[in-house]
Image (tube, rainbow, N blue to C red):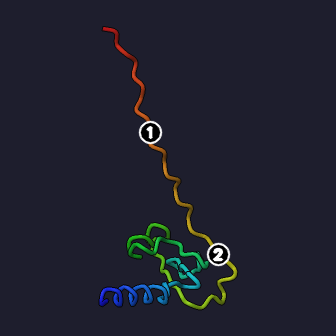
Amino acid sequence: MRALRYATATVLACLFSQPALAACYVVYGPDQEVIYRSVEPPVDLSRPLHETLPRVAPGGKLVFSLDSQGCELEINKLPQQPQARAPQRPAQGVRNPG
């Protein structure tokens, strides 16, 4: 019976907990110019920001808030990320008869 109460409490806690989401993400460049503003995060937030943000905006700062005012007009001046390269096939060599 005790296990059932713990399981029920765990399920209820998961159902009523809210994920931590921001309504607006803004990236400022090194010169304090807004280079990104959107409701979508510019980086993978499952990783630490000090690892991901310098890759997309070197010297930039990410600010996020729960207020979406001003985020209606999206801005994306981030440099384009290089496309993932397909793995190269090994060179086909000429067979040596021998």
Residue 77 position in % (x across, y down): 61, 70
Left or right, residue 77 beside residue 73 = left
Amino acid type at circle 2 is Ile
* For marks 2 and 1 on the same chain, the one whose residue lies earlier in the sequence: 2
Q: Nearer the viewer, residue 68 or 21?
A: 21
Q: Residue at x 58, y 84 (%)?
A: 24
Q: Is residue 85 above or below residue 18?
A: above
Q: Residues within 10 Å of mark 1 (few under 14, many from 20)?
A: few
Residue 67 position in % (x across, y down): 60, 91
Q: Which residue is at the far front?
A: 1
Q: Which residue is at the far top?
A: 98
Tell me, for residue 75, which label it has, or none.
2
**Disc 2 to disc 1, C-alpha distance:** 36 Å
**Which image quadrant for residue 80?**
bottom right
Amino acid type at circle 1 is Gln
Q: Is residue 84 above or below residue 69?
A: above
**Which image quadrant for residue 47?**
bottom left
| Quadrant location of the N terminus in the rendered image | bottom left
Tell me, for residue 28, which label it has, or none.
none
| Quadrant location of the C terminus in the rendered image | top left
Residue 55 position in % (x across, y down): 45, 67
Left or right, residue 6 beside residue 74 = left
Q: Residue at x 34, y 88 (%)?
A: 6
Q: Nearer the viewer, residue 71 or 33?
A: 71
Disc 1 element: loop
Q: Name the residue carrying label 1.
A: 88
**Which image quadrant for residue 95?**
top left
Q: Nearer the viewer, residue 26 or 29?
A: 26
Residue 49 position in % (x across, y down): 41, 76
Q: Residue at x 45, y 75 (%)?
A: 45
Image mark count: 2
